[in-house]
Image: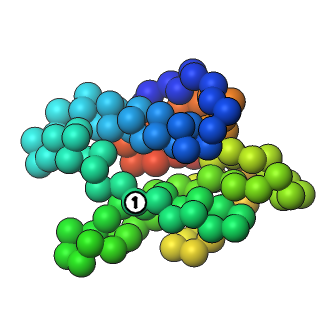
Amino acid sequence: MTMIKKKFTSIDDGINNMLDAAAYDYSKKGFTYRTSDDFRSKFMIAVGNKYIKIGRKSDYNGKMGQVWAFVVNTDDDAKFKRGDLLMAAGFYKPARNAPRGNVLDGGFNINWTGPLYL
């Protein structure tokens, strides 16, 4: 688990910082299958109107194979604010029970497997 402390004004910078922290956490686990740079390079980002979907590239076809997290990409959400980090409830939608952190505000923990449960 890695604590994210930095604050950002850009969602892109916040997401990149979070993914770098996840790769750092991966490097501390001692896996030999792939390096932390290989781990980091497999992330894919798909920007939508309401959410930014962050996933991992499939080794088979190069498309997004699994969803790692969602980030709120709008100021018009009734429950969440821009930059809130949400776990995936499925491939196409986030778990909307509670944010796991905010990529703009920092102050949350991240694991190489994704946002931590509440």
Identify the residue at horizontal 62%, vertical 53% (top origin): 71
Residue 64 x/y as whole percent = 38, 70
Query: Could you tell me which secondary element the residue under label 1 belongs to?
Result: strand
Q: Is residue 100 above or below residue 60?
A: above
Q: Residue at x 84, y 58 (%)?
A: 77
Total marks drawn?
1
Q: Relative to residue 99, is residue 44 drawn left or right?
A: left
Quarter that holds the C terminus: top right
The quarter of the picture where residue 44 lies is bottom left
Question: Callout 1, which amino acid?
Answer: Met
Above or below residue 66? Residue 37 is above
Query: Residue at the location (28% across, 50% down)?
Result: 41
Front in this rendered view, residue 80 or 98: 80
Q: In this view, which residue lies farthest toward the left?
A: 32
Question: Which color mode does the image show?
Answer: rainbow
Residue 113 position, x and y percent, is 39, 48
Q: Nearer the viewer, residue 33 or 12?
A: 12
Q: Is residue 118 visible?
A: no
Q: Is residue 31 left or right of residue 22?
A: left
Residue projecting furthest to the right: 78
40 above or below 14? below
Q: Quadrant of residue 35?
A: top left
Using a 10 Å C-alpha cutoff, classify the residue at mark 1 as few (fewer than 14 neighbours), some (14 to 19) or many (20 or more). Answer: some
Q: Quadrant of the N terminus?
A: top left
Q: Is residue 56 left or right of residue 106?
A: left
Task: Give the residue pinned by disc 1.
Answer: 44
Residue 57 in view: yes
Q: Residue at x 71, y 64 (%)?
A: 50
Q: In the displayed structure, does residue 91 sit left or right of residue 38?
A: right
Residue lying at the far top in this picture: please name it.
5
- Nearer to us in this view, 1 or 72: 72
Percent from the top left, x then y, of residue 67? 46, 64
